[in-house]
Image: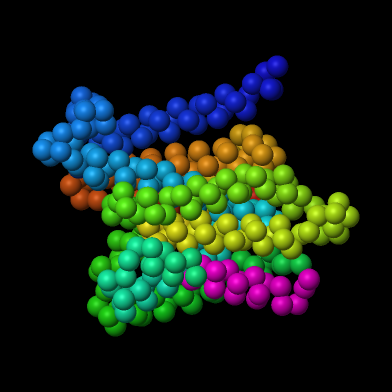
Amino acid sequence: MRSSLKYPLQIIAALIVLGLLLVMSIRYGSNQTPASTVFDAVFNYDQTNIDQRIIVSIRIPRVLGAMLIGSALAVSGALMQSVTKNPMADSGLLGINAGAAFMLTLCFTFFPKMSTLDTTAFSVFGAAISAGLVFMISSLKKSQMSPTILVLAGMAISAFFTAISEGIALVANLKQDLAFWHFGGISAVSWNQLARLGPWIIIALIVVYLMSSNLNLLSLSDDSIKSLGKNIISIRLLALVCVVILSGISVSLVGAVAFVGLIIPHIAKFLVGTNNKKVIPMTILLGADLTVLADLIARTIDPPKETPFGIIISLVGVPFFIYLARRDGNQI
């Protein structure tokens, strides 16, 4: 009985934490907003009230954006770890985010008036190119992907695209403009962006959950999967398409934020086990919890200045990466 109740209680706890963080994030920023003002802004909106306009126009879309982006990055990391059978895999560490960031740098440099939808399409395209290059390099000599070569290829591709992006930004005098975005900034997320891009993230997350049973099979050998009558190529391809969509949209909105996809899937598996039917929902919630909390800390740590929330996440991510490297070094 206790075992059957454990998972629902964990999900409820993660939802409660997320709800509390959302309320705190809406209330707190460069200054504290009274709870009554937040209540009126949501249920009795007065457009002439400046505090209510800040809440509705800036804080709420920002918080919702942080929640969606956290879920997207966390699930993309879980997918990468399942597809590659590598506990260190993450869209940021494997260069996919860098490819998306490279295409966005090109957009900002040569097409500064491009619409949000168009820049996002380029970002997803850049993520796809980077993913293709990484997986092509990692499987040059073997029928199955080598985890070691995969990580090295990801580091090389990431360094390559990052260097080119930095060079273009320097020549085009965009270094300062892009600095905050490169470190992960969510302050510019708007209702318009959420309306256009949010549904794509939600659809991708639903697709991932629906294919979670097939993701469980990826822990088996290729021959074992084929003996069960499953098409391993189609499973991996659909998973990678979801990774590219989730990563590309995330980078276009908040920049190249690493470590969310590395940290959260491991915490989710520690809490609920390795069954992806349970891991994916928990990963979605914990990813949202982490990014909303990081954004809240970034806004309140040194007001009125704002610290890029990607730096806050990296302060946790780097030690966690070192811990995983020591624990799972033989699998890398």
Locate residue 76, reporting x and y percent: 56, 54
Q: Nearer the viewer, residue 66 or 156?
A: 66
Tell me which colouring the rendered structure shows: rainbow
- The answer to whether residue 138 is magenta is yes
Q: Is residue 234 visible?
A: yes
Q: Quadrant of residue 331?
A: bottom right
Point 37% across, 34% down: residue? 21
Identify which residue is drawn at 32% across, 79% down. Answer: 110
Point out residue 9 in the picture as x, y percentages from the top left corner: 57, 24
- Along the line of sight, which residue is nearer the eye, 60 or 66? 60
Q: Is residue 43 above or below residue 298?
A: above
| 101 inside magenta stretch | no
Q: Residue at x 41, y 64 (%)?
A: 120
Residue drawn at (23%, 39%) of the image: 55
Q: Main secondary structure of the magenta part?
A: helix
Q: Residue furthest right?
A: 227
- The answer, for residue 51, to whether it is visible in the render is no
Tell me where the magenta segment starts and ends, as one range: 126-143
> Which quadrant is home to the C terminus?
bottom right
In depth, the one of 313 and 39 nearer the eye is 39
Picture coordinates of residue 258 (x, y %)? 47, 57
Residue 279 position within the rendered picture, expressed as x and y whole percent measured from the top left: 62, 40
In the rendered image, the quadrant that contains the N terminus is top right
